Amino acid sequence: MTTLVFEAPGPDSPGYLRRSRQALEFQRSLSDNPTPETLDRMVEFLAQYVSEPADHDAKIEALWMASKAQFNDLLTAISAGEGENPTPAPTT
């Protein structure tokens, strides 16, 4: 089992509105009609906030193995600017 450590930026981190907008767009598209391209973009977007595993390919693979609930939690953390504490999300 791989542990995915996600560190969402806090509300005072630069780019708050841009991150929030992207996260909200992903949340909306997931509930409407997700496409493979949307999922690819979402995984790349979220990978920039993964601190563990450190390797980019391992980050991408760990995100692909996350559950829907975990993805929703990660997007919520980004859109809400709740980045004070790292969020470990165990994946397989």
Image (cartoon, rainbow, N blue to C red):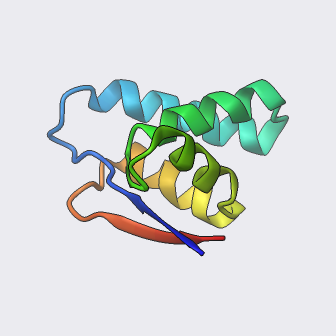
Residue that protrudes farthest toward the left in the picture: 12
Q: Which quadrant of the figure has residue 91?
A: bottom right
Quadrant into which the C terminus falls: bottom right
Position of residue 71 relative to residue 44, above or below, is below
Quadrant into which the N terminus falls: bottom right
Position of residue 58 relative to residue 19, above or below, is below
Position of residue 50 measured from the top left corner of the image (x, y, whole percent): 40, 49
Observer-nearest of 68 and 48 = 48
Position of residue 32 relative to residue 86, above or below, is above
Observer-nearest of 55 and 43 = 55
| Residue at image location 30% in from the left, 55% down from the top | 82
| Residue at image location 38% in from the left, 44% down from the top | 49
Q: How many labels does the image show?
A: 0
Observer-nearest of 9 and 64 = 64
Position of residue 29 measured from the top left corner of the image (x, y, whole percent): 72, 34
- The answer to whether 74 appears left or right of 84 in the picture is right
- The answer to whether 37 appears left or right of 43 in the picture is right
| Residue at image location 65% in from the left, 61% down from the top | 66
Position of residue 69 measured from the top left corner of the image (x, y, whole percent): 65, 65
- The answer to whether 69 appears left or right of 31 in the picture is left
Position of residue 89 measured from the top left corner of the image (x, y, whole percent): 50, 69
Position of residue 84 relative to residue 75, above or below, is below
